[in-house]
Each structure stands twice: as C-alpha cells, then as structure tokens.
Amino acid sequence: MDDNDNPDPGNDFSGDSSWTLGAESDSVYFFGSDKESSILSEFGWNLQPEEAHHRSLEPERFGDVERIESSDLAGRLPLAESSGLECSAAAAQIGSAEKAGDASTSNPSVSSSSSEDPPEKSTGSGGGKPPEIPSKGRKKGQKRIRQPRFAFMTKSEVDHLEDGYRWRKYGQKAVKNSPFPRSYYRCTNSKCTVKKRVERSSEDPSIVITTYEGQHCHHTVGFPRGGVISQEVTFDGRMTPPLTSHFYYPDMSFHREVSHSGSMAQSHQVPAQAREARALAEPSPQLPTDEGLLGDMVPPGMRNG
DNA sequence: CGGCTTTGACCAGCGC
DNA sequence: GCGCTGGTCAAAGCCG
C-alpha cells in the first residue's frame, strides 16, 4: 500500500481522520481530530496522546475493519446475541450490515451471498474441478464480504494462542513493514466461517496481534491440545508473564483492557454505553469458563454459541 | 490414513 | 492502467 520509507499515513497523527485508535478500530476514535477527544471523553476515556499512541497499531493493516460512524453508534452497540441464528446466516447477517456504505441491515442476501460460506470451498470454485478455470476459487466479480472483526494484542511468546477453538492454518504471508509473517487460520468447524489472523507486532515482537473475523456458531471444543486453558496462561507451566491485552471491538465501539492475572475479569475504562450493551447481551458478567479464552474476549455480539 | 502445516501461485482491492 | 499488497487456494509434505 504505502512505501516503506514513507511514513504510514495512518501513523501520522498530524494527518486527518483516517487514523483510528483501535487497531481494528472504528471511526469513532479519531486521532488528530476534534472528534477524538469529544467522543473519547463521551465514553469516559481519558487517553493521553502517548497512551493512545501506545495503544495504536499500524492502522494500514486493519484498514478493512468495519468502521462505525459515531452517528451510527447507538444502533450498533446492542449487537444482540443472535442465539437462534444458523452459523452461516449469523455470519452473513453481520457481514451484510457492514462494508457496504448503505449499511442497510436488512440485506436480503443474508442466506445466500456470504462469500465466506463453506460452499466456497467444497462446491464450486477450485474445489473438485480440474484446473480448467483460471480463477482459483473465488467467484469472479463477487465482492469479498468482510465480517466484523476485532483484534487484541497479547504479550505472549507463543504466536497462536489457545482460545478453545480449533483452527486450521491456511496461509501465511510476509507483511509489509514487519519482519514477522502473518498467519491465517480458519475454524475447523465446517459450518463455522470464523477466521483469525495472527501476527507479531513489528514494534514490539513480544506482542502478538490476533484478529478475529466472524462469529463462532458453536461452542468451544474444550481445550483439545493439552487440555489446559490458554497457552499463554499455562505457558511454561506457570502464570507468567502477567499478560496484558488490549482489545479493540470495532463493532462494540468500545475498548477494553484486560490484565490476565488469574482471572481475566478485570476490565478497565469500559465506556458506560458499552458496559450497558454488554449487560444487555450477557446476563452475567462472569462468563462461563467453557468459553475458553475467547469467551472472555469476544464481545457478546460476536459470539453465537 | 486423516488432519494439519507449508508454500508458491493466483486473485481482488486499492492507491497512484 | 499499473503495480503493490493482502487474502486465499490447493498441492505436497509431514506427523501422530
């Protein structure tokens, strides 16, 4: 996208509103604009510039994350848990609400058009056909539909954090401006379209940036590999280091900072509105542990299990 | 043998 | 229109 030597426009705080606070974040938290301070303070956030900078990631990597205009905030916050939705339907429904500027949540293509649906692989496209068709799987002309994402940073020595779900790696790419490759994972559940990207921060190699896309439509499988809770907690058999993650919930429009010190229940600086939204979506602040790491991370609206 | 990772190639989107 | 980059595919190989 940008040149290596060219300072990332996203990192340029003097730039305009293209900069967003959350790595994955939304247009709500603008840097370098009046919007920023007003909205942040409205949410009860009181970020110092340095802190904000510290929290920020390279936005260019997350530019495709759903953006939520502040005016749309109220409508997006109570992204209710759609417990009854089918896997693909749930994903498609969410996906349909974004990307397109129209943001009309009533997309009739809900059940059929999600390009992220399993059929993409199993049926058509490159799947069973001999390499006759030049296109490698994706239907041509069909827009890739992005599902809501959220990202969080975790100080951890292991790249792939155990989160209770099983993932299949389907790709790895070198990323621009980073010596570390980015890995692409997909949920092994055939009906689940959730993906995640894992990469290390180029600025702080000890930080793992995990980006989830989509919504699980099933429960965790427990902790299959090793049977213990998240690797970073049990790493080396002890609770070291005290993990700190920064969460960015573009869809929820709030951020949460969690200290992993035994319990992950500590939340700081959660905007009041967001807390309200959370309260609406989840009856109990104490999530059942069978949700695994994700259970405590994923905003209620993004879970569907 | 099934599941998973690796890896090179392909494709779409975006900025210039 | 072109080039760059991110994202995905799928064949091949590895491993339990």
Image (cartoon, coloured by chain):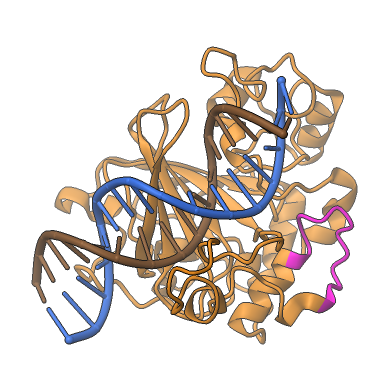
Chain colours: A orange, B blue, C brown
Give the side of residue A176 with respect to residue A156, left or right. Answer: right
Foreground residue, A75 or A99? Answer: A99
- Which residue corresponds to the image point at 71% horizontal and 67% vertical from the top-left? A94
In the rendered view, tell whether residue A43 sits above or below residue A49: below
Q: Which quadrant does the C terminus of chain A fall into?
A: bottom right
Residue A190: image quadrant is bottom left
Name the residue at the front extreme: A132
Residue A202 in picture, x, y percent from top left: 41, 27
Residue found at x 59% / y 23%: A53
Magenta stretch bounds? A96-108
| Residue A165 x %, y % | 39, 69
- Percent x, y of residue B7: 28, 47
* The N terminus of chain A - image quarter: top right
Confirm whether residue A80 shows in the render: no
Relative depth, front residue between B15 and A162: B15
Task: Say above or below: A66 vs A222.
Answer: above
**In-front residue for pair B5/A90:** B5
Q: Where A176 falls versus A115 (above or below)? A: above
Would residue A187 appear left or right of A145 to someone viewing this image? Answer: left
Residue A179 in percent (x, y) is at 36, 28
A300 left or right of A38 in image: left
